[in-house]
Image (spheres, grey):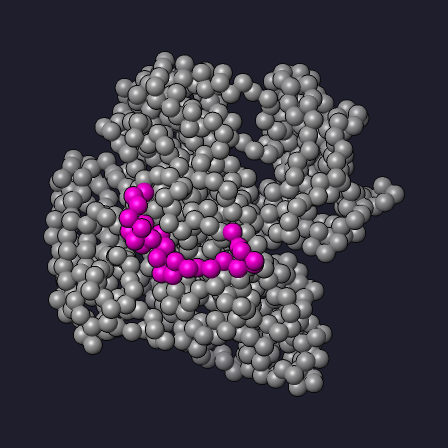
């Protein structure tokens, strides 16, 4: 750990000890009503301030791959870091710590005290819709990265919030589903993923989930006390996921803070329960003291020390570096890296090449100042080459926002749109100038509840003559006018009850309109707000844009193949869209959307020097993987995605990633697949066997195993040394020698797995117990020390039990490529 960090942590501990009396004095100064008020948020993102005890508000903000701030506003852009799966692919706790530090610097810039991240639920099934936001299928890798992320955030004086506690590993019916898992499964997988972030990184908050676990919803579950508080020593705030607290009963549990506010199920009901003796006031006092402690830690309590950032990161530079480190090279048939000096014609193909996804959908979404697509990155890196672009296949589903450069604000005359909230008689309550046609009001000052109508206007001067489908996406009734004529009128009502899915991915209505290049049209969207109530009266999402035009799909593929044939090399970018991977729902299929598989086959047939880049946050099927010259996995690569892609393609940087999750060859082979509740329940019947553990148990072979990935040089594992014996609770150091046999500097990720085939208890075939990244100069060797806690050899049976005997420790580079081994005897 950096010495500055150590100094800061020690100072923090001493300060907390000295000011305990301040916290108890502040508590004593509060009335019961004030104490209870503190336990529910003031609004969507803030806690209540109480001036008389020197307490200001605590501002929380969604993460975890950027920090949005109090409002979702393109006029105050946010750093867009690569997705969590990209971060996890680096297998590097130091990158994760720096990533957390960058998030904290961004939070402090925006006045944010608490980042709602990291998301550390497990990739139980590849169909999970939100896996881009979580790290891995493995609890040990997840725990290591989560602890490092939390350390980076909190060393910079901002609270981190590991979420969603616990077993929130899928989205379907997430508000009401009950997850059934035995205690061993919870302890060895789903709780283990959280443990290190609490016991070692000392997270200041934990977020409780929506789902139930074994019959009790997370906000009322005994798991909030045991193991979180009683065993792990958690002394922070358990904050609910938004609207996850449903009853007064949760106040009896170790749930501390209800979000959002100001309305919630505690309030007056909790005051009355304390007055009548139904709930002891000490229960309320414990919660309040935890909130005051958090306030002290983030500097929200008068007299708290000002904390300067310990780790100061250039966020943009880190976004590019993290994207490179997370890029996984899965196939390379002597194609990469490309020699920039030899390239005259490069064909870049694919919808996601020009309109790349840099982040997943839902509450994790931020609004960056800019994004660099793979097409942008390749063109910038190859200024002397001819770089063509072909769409190839339509991936987009839903609306694409209108280009800012083609929009004129009718009030200011500058680029953008005019937004207004109006009364029933047309009077303006609130007006503002915006720079995007995708707008989210979630917190902030917009008078959604008071307004009867929302109006968005702009003059659109298209640069191309074409027929497009112009429309809107929102919840409720709206009309769209072009040059004063009604083009679309619709009342869009969501199906289902998941407000996350409905809010961020509403239905769309559109109609064709003919555009002439250079000829302006006046566009006006009118949205009826009069019927909004509950959540909808305080939050608004709407989008004005265009849907994909009707296209000849065969012609698009043929055009792309023709461009490929004429080029020296080809980059095809395939991927998912915002409808496939987002918060609120799970995936229906692992196949790439649209005709992308056909596109790749046609391009490869036209030019064998075809490199495919996958722009997806979680596994997709790649049936053509054996036919391409090279295959790269870029995940959702953040705002510097395209520059990172160019760095890897041209060998400026090494692809540093290894798979944090197993990728299947066929959906039918996946051993744990279903996310669909049956009678409101999802049974985790597979127990401790998920991910590569389940694949090993089933005997099926995936496309790419957990841990897979390669670089541009050969770094071999050549020797291993480790103690032969250990006692329960010890941490064993496994020393591995690696040798770089190539002519380039390179990276390897050393992975250590345990096996105990003679075990008397059910165990995985093998399971990860430690890992470490190493960078080795060309032609040199290095020693890598991997810490292996014997605790990871224990199993849960009413407590952590150590089965005495010999464990085989296998060392390698994937879950199945394990050339080295040693043994470790654990005593009783």
Magenta span: 676-702
Which residue is rendered at x = 36% and y = 13% of the image? 566
Which residue is rendered at x = 39% and y = 42% of the image? 668
Does residue 752 appear to the left or right of 535 in the view shown?
Answer: left
- The answer to whether residue 346 is visible is no
Q: Is residue 693 magenta?
A: yes
Single out the residue that lies furthest toward the right: 425
Which quarter of the image is occupied by the C terminus? bottom left
Which residue is rendered at x = 33% and y = 53% of the image? 694
Q: Say above or below: 302 vs 210.
A: below
- The answer to whether residue 605 is visible is yes
Name the spot of residue 560 as percent of width and height, x first.
Answer: 43, 18
Does residue 305 appear to the left or right of 725 in the view shown?
Answer: right
Q: Say above or below: 508 vs 818.
A: above
Secondary structure mainly formed by the magenta segment: loop
Q: Say above or below: 564 vs 398.
A: above
Name the spot of residue 534 as percent of width and height, x first.
Answer: 72, 56
Q: Nearer the viewer, residue 214 or 647?
A: 214
Q: Is residue 502 magenta?
A: no
Which residue is rendered at x = 61% and y = 19% of the image? 463
Number of disc labels: 0
Name the spot of residue 47 as percent of width and height, x first.
Answer: 62, 65
Which quarter of the image is occupied by the N terminus? bottom left
């Amino acid at each position: 750990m950096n010495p500055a960090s150590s100094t800061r942590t020690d100072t923090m501990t001493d300060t907390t000890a000295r000011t305990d009396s301040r916290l108890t004095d502040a508590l004593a100064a509060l009335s019961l009503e004030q104490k209870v008020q503190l336990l529910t948020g003031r609004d969507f993102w803030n806690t209540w301030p109480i001036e008389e005890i020197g307490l200001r508000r605590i501002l929380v903000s969604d993460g975890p791959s950027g920090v949005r701030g109090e409002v979702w506003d393109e006029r105050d852009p946010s750093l867009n870091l690569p997705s969590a799966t990209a971060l996890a692919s680096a297998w590097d706790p130091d990158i994760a710590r720096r990533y957390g530090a960058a998030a904290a610097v961004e939070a402090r810039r925006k006045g944010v005290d608490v980042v709602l991240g990291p998301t550390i639920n497990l990739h139980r099934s590849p169909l999970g819709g939100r896996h881009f936001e979580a790290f891995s299928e493995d609890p040990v890798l997840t725990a290591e990265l989560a602890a490092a992320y939390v350390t980076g955030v909190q060393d910079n004086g901002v609270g981190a919030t590991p979420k969603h506690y616990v077993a929130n590993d899928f989205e379907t019916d997430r508000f009401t589903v009950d997850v059934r898992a035995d205690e061993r499964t919870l302890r060895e997988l789903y709780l283990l993923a959280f443990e290190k972030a609490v016991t070692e990184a000392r997270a200041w908050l934990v977020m409780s989930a929506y789902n139930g676990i074994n019959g009790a919803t997370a906000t009322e579950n005994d798991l909030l006390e045991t193991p979180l508080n009683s065993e792990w020593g958690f002394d922070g705030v358990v904050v609910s996921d938004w609207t996850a607290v449903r009853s007064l009963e949760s106040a009896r549990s170790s749930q501390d803070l209800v979000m959002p506010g100001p309305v919630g199920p505690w309030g007056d009901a909790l005051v009355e329960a304390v007055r009548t003796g139904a709930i002891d006031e000490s229960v309320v006092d414990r919660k309040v003291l935890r909130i005051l402690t958090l306030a002290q830690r983030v500097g929200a309590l008068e007299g708290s020390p000002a904390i300067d950032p310990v780790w100061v990161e250039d966020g943009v530079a880190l976004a590019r570096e993290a994207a490179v480190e997370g890029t996984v090279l899965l196939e390379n048939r002597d194609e990469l890296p490309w020699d920039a000096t030899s390239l005259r014609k490069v064909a870049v193909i694919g919808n996601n090449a020009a309109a790349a996804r840099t982040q997943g959908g839902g509450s994790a979404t931020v609004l960056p100042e800019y994004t660099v697509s793979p097409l942008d990155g390749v063109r910038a890196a190859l200024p002397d080459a001819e770089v063509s672009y072909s769409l190839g296949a339509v991936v987009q589903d839903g609306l694409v926002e209108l280009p800012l450069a083609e929009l004129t604000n009718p009030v200011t005359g500058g680029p953008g749109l005019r937004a207004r909230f109006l009364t029933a008689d047309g009077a303006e309550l609130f007006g503002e100038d915006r720079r995007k046609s995708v707008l989210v009001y979630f917190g902030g000052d917009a008078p959604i509840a008071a307004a009867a109508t929302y109006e968005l206007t702009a003059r659109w001067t298209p640069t191309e003559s074409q027929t497009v489908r112009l429309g809107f996406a929102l919840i409720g009734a709206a009309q769209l006018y072009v040059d004063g004529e009604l083009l679309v009128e619709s009342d869009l009502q969501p199906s289902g009850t998941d407000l996350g899915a409905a809010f961020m991915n509403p239905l769309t209505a559109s109609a064709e309109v003919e555009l002439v290049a250079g000829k302006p049209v006046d566009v006006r969207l009118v949205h009826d707000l009069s019927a909004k109530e509950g959540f909808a009266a305080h939050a608004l999402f709407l989008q004005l844009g265009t849907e994909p035009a009707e296209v000849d799909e065969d012609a698009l593929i043929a055009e792309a193949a023709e461009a490929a044939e004429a080029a020296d090399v080809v980059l095809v970018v395939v991927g998912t869209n915002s409808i496939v991977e987002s918060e609120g729902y799970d995936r229906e299929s692992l196949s790439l959307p649209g005709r992308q598989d056909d596109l790749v086959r046609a391009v490869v047939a036209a030019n064998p020097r075809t490199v495919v880049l996958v722009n997806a946050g979680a596994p997709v099927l790649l049936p053509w993987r054996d036919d391409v010259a090279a295959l790269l996995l870029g995940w959702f690569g953040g705002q510097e995605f395209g520059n990172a892609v160019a760095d890897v393609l041209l060998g400026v940087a090494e692809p540093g990633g290894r798979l944090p999750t197993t990728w299947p060859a066929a959906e039918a082979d996946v051993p744990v697949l279903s996310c669909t509740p049956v009678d409101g329940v999802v049974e985790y019947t597979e127990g401790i066997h998920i991910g590569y553990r389940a694949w090993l148990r089933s005997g099926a072979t995936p496309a790419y195993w957990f841990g897979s990935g390669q670089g541009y040089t050969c770094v071999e594992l050549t020797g291993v040394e480790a103690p032969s014996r250990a006692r329960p609770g010890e941490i064993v150091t496994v020393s591995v020698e690696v040798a770089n046999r190539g002519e380039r500097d390179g990276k390897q990720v050393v992975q250590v797995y345990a096996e105990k085939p003679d075990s008397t208890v059910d165990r995985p075939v093998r399971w990860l117990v430690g890992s470490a990244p190493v960078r080795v100069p060309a032609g040199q060797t290095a020693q890598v020390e991997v810490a292996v806690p014997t605790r990871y050899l224990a199993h849960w049976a009413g407590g952590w039990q150590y089965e005495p005997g010999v464990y085989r420790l296998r060392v390698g580079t994937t879950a199945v490529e394990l050339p080295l081994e040693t043994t470790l005897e654990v005593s009783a």
